[in-house]
Image (cartoon, helix red, strand yellow):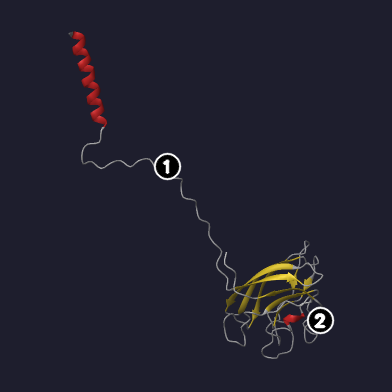
């Protein structure tokens, strides 16, 4: 009899303990522990550019690169890099009048972009073509960092100054800013059409 009473007491204690762990009726349920992986941190994306040009070599050359173009109060700001150049040297760098790089020597891009029919010259002062820009300079690895402005030009602006659809051309030597009509900068070693940037 005592054994039976003891068994009943133990059973009652266990039942009470189990009931005490149950959630009271109507009480808000505690949230289940989350097993979801933490959200990945998003990295800042680069600002969208208005236009871009993929510069490809003309026949017999190895110069390549990519530049981005954006409007600024002074003109179209051009940034990027050009590689495959002769090390530690300067090269003519211009906007040309036609967005056509199909000719093996790049001649299909026409002459310098020159809507005002001005004389060729130094873009940092005096009379010059709208497409005249400072020479780019390569480092010991043959890479040139581009950070320049084509003064007086626009993107999606007035037809006379808009360089969208024109071409960026790299020459084999430096522009002397004096010789007419193109600065005696030699052959065209690379050419790229200015176009809307492609979607990622």
Front position in the image: 80 or 34: 34
Q: Residue at x 73, y 72 (%)?
A: 136
* Residue located farthest toward the bottom when viewing the structure as drawn: 117
Position in image of residue 137 (x %, y %): 75, 69
Question: What secondary structure is found at the residue carrying circle 1?
Answer: loop
Q: Quadrant of the N terminus?
A: top left
Position in image of residue 8 (x %, y %): 20, 16
Would you place residue 168 above or below residue 43 in this image?
Answer: below
Q: Quadrant of residue 99?
A: bottom right
Q: Mark 2, mark 1: which one is toward the viewer?
A: 1
Q: Earlier in the sequence, mark 2 or mark 1?
A: 1
Position in image of residue 41 (x %, y %): 50, 52
Would you place residue 83 above or below residue 125 in this image?
Answer: above
- Does residue 34 appear to the left or right of 94 in the view shown? left
Would you place residue 34 above or below residue 160 in this image?
Answer: above
Position in image of residue 31 (x %, y %): 33, 42
Q: Residues within 10 Å of mark 1 (few under 14, many from 20)?
A: few
- Does residue 159 appear to the left or right of 117 in the view shown? left
Q: Residue at x 74, y 89 (%)?
A: 119
Q: Residues within 10 Å of mark 2 (few under 14, many from 20)?
A: some
Label number found at residue 35: 1
Label number found at residue 168: none
Would you place residue 33 above or below residue 182 in this image?
Answer: above
Q: Are marks 2 and 1 in contact (CB under 8 Å)?
A: no
Q: Residue at x 26, y 27 (%)?
A: 18
Q: Quadrant of residue 46?
A: bottom right
- Does residue 41 appear to the left or right of 162 in the view shown? left
* Residue at image mark 2: 184
Question: What secondary structure is found at the residue carrying circle 2?
Answer: loop
Q: CA distance from mark 2 to mark 1?
A: 68 Å
């Amino acid at each position: 009899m005592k054994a039976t009473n003891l068994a009943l007491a133990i059973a009652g204690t266990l039942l009470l303990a189990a009931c005490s762990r149950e959630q009271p009726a109507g009480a808000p349920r505690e949230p289940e522990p989350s097993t979801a992986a933490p959200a990945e941190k998003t990295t800042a994306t680069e600002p969208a550019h208005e236009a871009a040009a993929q510069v490809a070599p003309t026949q017999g050359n190895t110069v390549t690169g990519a530049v981005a173009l954006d409007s600024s109060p002074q003109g179209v700001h051009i940034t990027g890099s050009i590689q495959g150049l002769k090390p530690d040297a300067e090269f003519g760098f211009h906007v040309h009048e036609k967005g056509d790089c199909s000719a093996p020597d790049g001649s299909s891009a026409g002459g310098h972009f020159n809507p005002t029919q001005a004389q060729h010259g130094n873009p940092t002062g005096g009379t010059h073509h709208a497409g005249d820009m400072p020479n780019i300079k390569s480092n010991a690895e043959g890479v040139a960092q581009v950070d320049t402005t084509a003064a007086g030009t626009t993107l999606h602006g007035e037809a006379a100054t808009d360089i969208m659809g024109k071409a960026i051309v790299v020459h084999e030597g430096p522009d002397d800013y004096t010789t007419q009509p193109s600065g005696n900068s030699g052959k065209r070693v690379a050419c790229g059409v200015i176009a809307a940037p492609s979607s990622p």
